[in-house]
């Protein structure tokens, strides 16, 4: 195989590939030998059909298969040996081809630019840890205790007040008629929370054990029996018990009931929990700082076809006139996204970062936990949409790259208070609203562009060899 690379303009190249007639004949002979044992023709024993007979009957089909194989192998090899990474699918132009002929073709390709990533080690970014004051931890524990009160049954003559737990049976009617769901047994309400029906709690104030109370309330708009929605209902309530809240004692026993070893362990767990609540948001700020720094890296030329493709994505759903008006801004944004994506991908490739199946499944499980009650729907979505799984893989891939950059770069470590964290996040939110998330990067797309060398040449060779229009010389 003889390969000649010609620079046309900038990143555009023509790769001329020539395979001599003898080599092509060898490919054909190998294929004839391969199929000889599988062909059954009348008058010939299996495996004994002469080559000339096979050529006469199956020559065109065999040559098509051989051509497809040779184009795929040689085009991939030509790109790999010359270290050319296509930015998109190369165009293949067959010049000379045919059985008993040499093969000559030209791959027209736009190459991805060479990227120098050594300066990534000099990137500076803020890495935050939140110091949780002991008073914040105590405050959170007190809130938990407040929401988990103990109740002690009051004496029969005790009247119910706000904060008491009242248990009762009821029978309800609308216009004197009972309805589906009109009975309730041992219903329990904490008075003052108004969690049952609006205004229901207040009418139980002052009741005591064994009292019967008539409570009137409006059934909600979303009541299951639609014809009763927004109608007034009467509830005959038989009070079973009135219980008074007792202050929860925050001690080792309380901590154990929450799954901690003791109170000291509980405080540590709660402190970590509060810190984790800020960690993800602060990590995103660090990531955006890194991406902003990557935007400053110099890349001499960005492939026009990638810019065009990104602009199309950005202008999806817009009218033609609006897209034209916004084109300049879209081009600038596209260049930023593509450049950052290319740098991230180059860093990922040089450091051999890959996403394994276990990591992908862990991310899917994370998505499932974020939608409790809808796990089956989410799982079905990923099972039926390979593109969604690929996008998820891209997300994990990018996170692994960012995390490694953090390890190799120069963090400015800052220990901040909870109040400082909230202030930083609020300021960041205001800035991001103004910038409309210009720094967001879809590196999975950039990864696709750098992996087209094998896929695109394979697709190109198949389409050309299967009978589509080619130019001949």
Image (cartoon, rainbow, N blue to C red):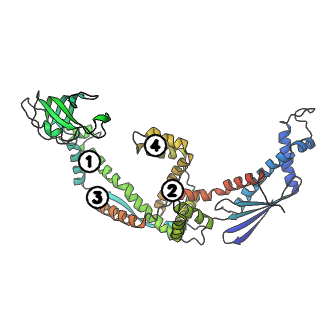
Mark 1 secondary-structure assignment: helix
Q: Mark 3 points at which residue?
A: 418
Choose the circle earlier in sequence order: 4 or 3. Answer: 4
Q: Distance between the residues labelled 2 and 4?
A: 18 Å
Q: Closer to the observer: label 1 or label 3?
A: 3
Residues under numbered marks 2 and 4 in contact, where contact means CB atoms less than 8 Å apart: no
In the depicted view, which residue is nearer to us: 12 or 232? 232
Crowding at mark 1 (Cα within 10 Å: few <14, some 14-19, many 20+): some
Q: Distance between the residues labelled 2 and 3?
A: 28 Å
Mark 3 secondary-structure assignment: helix
Q: How far apart are marks 1 and 3 (CA)?
A: 16 Å
Locate residue 424, reporting x and y percent.
Answer: 33, 63
Q: How far apart are marks 4 and 3 (CA)?
A: 30 Å
Disc ID at residue 398: 2
In the picture, the quarter occupied by the C terminus is bottom right
Q: Name the residue under label 4.
A: 365
Q: Give the left or right position of residue 329, taking residue 262 as reference.
A: right
In the depicted view, which residue is nearer to us: 118 or 58? 58
Mark 2 secondary-structure assignment: helix
Q: Distance between the residues labelled 1 and 2?
A: 35 Å
Choose the circle earlier in sequence order: 1 or 2. Answer: 1
Residues under numbered marks 1 and 4 in contact, where contact means CB atoms less than 8 Å apart: no
Q: Closer to the observer: label 1 or label 2?
A: 2
Disc ID at residue 267: 1
Choose the circle earlier in sequence order: 1 or 3. Answer: 1
Crowding at mark 2 (Cα within 10 Å: few <14, some 14-19, many 20+): many
């Amino acid at each position: 195989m003889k390969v000649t690379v010609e620079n046309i303009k900038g990143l555009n190249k023509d790769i001329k590939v020539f395979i001599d007639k003898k080599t092509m004949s060898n490919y054909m002979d190998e294929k004839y030998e391969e199929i000889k044992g599988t062909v059954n023709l009348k008058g010939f024993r299996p495996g004994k059909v002469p080559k000339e007979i096979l050529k006469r009957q199956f020559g065109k089909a065999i040559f098509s298969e051989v051509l497809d194989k040779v184009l795929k192998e040689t085009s991939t090899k030509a790109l790999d040996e010359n270290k050319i990474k296509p930015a998109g699918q190369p165009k293949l132009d067959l010049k000379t081809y045919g059985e008993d002929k040499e093969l000559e073709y030209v791959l027209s390709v736009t190459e991805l630019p060479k990227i120098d990533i050594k300066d990534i080690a000099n990137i500076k970014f803020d890495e935050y840890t939140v110091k949780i004051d002991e008073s914040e931890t105590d405050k959170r524990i007190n809130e938990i205790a407040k929401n988990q009160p103990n109740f002690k049954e009051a004496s029969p003559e005790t009247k119910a007040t706000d904060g008491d737990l009242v248990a009762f049976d009821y029978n309800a009617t609308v216009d004197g008629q009972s309805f589906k769901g009109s009975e309730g047994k041992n219903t329990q309400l904490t008075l003052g929370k108004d969690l049952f029906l609006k205004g229901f709690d207040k009418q139980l104030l002052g009741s005591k054990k064994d009292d019967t109370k008539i409570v009137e309330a409006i059934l909600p708009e979303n009541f299951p029996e639609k014809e009763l929605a927004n109608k007034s209902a009467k509830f005959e309530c038989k009070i079973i018990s009135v219980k008074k809240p007792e202050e929860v004692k925050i001690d080792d026993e309380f901590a154990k009931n929450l799954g901690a070893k003791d109170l000291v362990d509980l405080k540590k767990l709660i402190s970590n929990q509060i810190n984790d609540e800020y960690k993800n948001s602060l990590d995103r700020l660090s990531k955006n700082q890194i991406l902003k720094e990557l935007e400053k890296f110099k890349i001499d030329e960005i492939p026009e076809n990638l810019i065009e493709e990104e602009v199309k994505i950005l202008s999806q759903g817009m009218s033609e006139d609006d897209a034209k008006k916004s084109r300049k801004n879209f081009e600038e944004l596209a260049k930023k996204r593509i450049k950052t994506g290319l740098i991230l991908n180059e860093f990922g490739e040089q450091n051999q970062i890959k996403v394994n199946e276990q990591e992908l499944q862990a991310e899917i499980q994370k998505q499932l936990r974020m939608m409790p009650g809808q796990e089956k729907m989410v799982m079905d979505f990923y099972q039926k949409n390979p593109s969604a799984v690929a996008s998820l893989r891209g997300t994990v891939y990018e996170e692994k790259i960012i995390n490694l950059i953090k390890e190799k770069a120069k963090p400015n470590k800052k220990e901040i208070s909870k109040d400082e964290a909230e202030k930083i996040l609020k300021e960041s939110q205001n800035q991001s609203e103004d910038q409309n998330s210009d720094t967001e990067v879809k590196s999975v797309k950039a990864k696709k562009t750098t992996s087209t060398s094998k896929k695109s040449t394979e697709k190109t060779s198949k389409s050309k060899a299967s009978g589509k229009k080619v130019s001949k010389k």
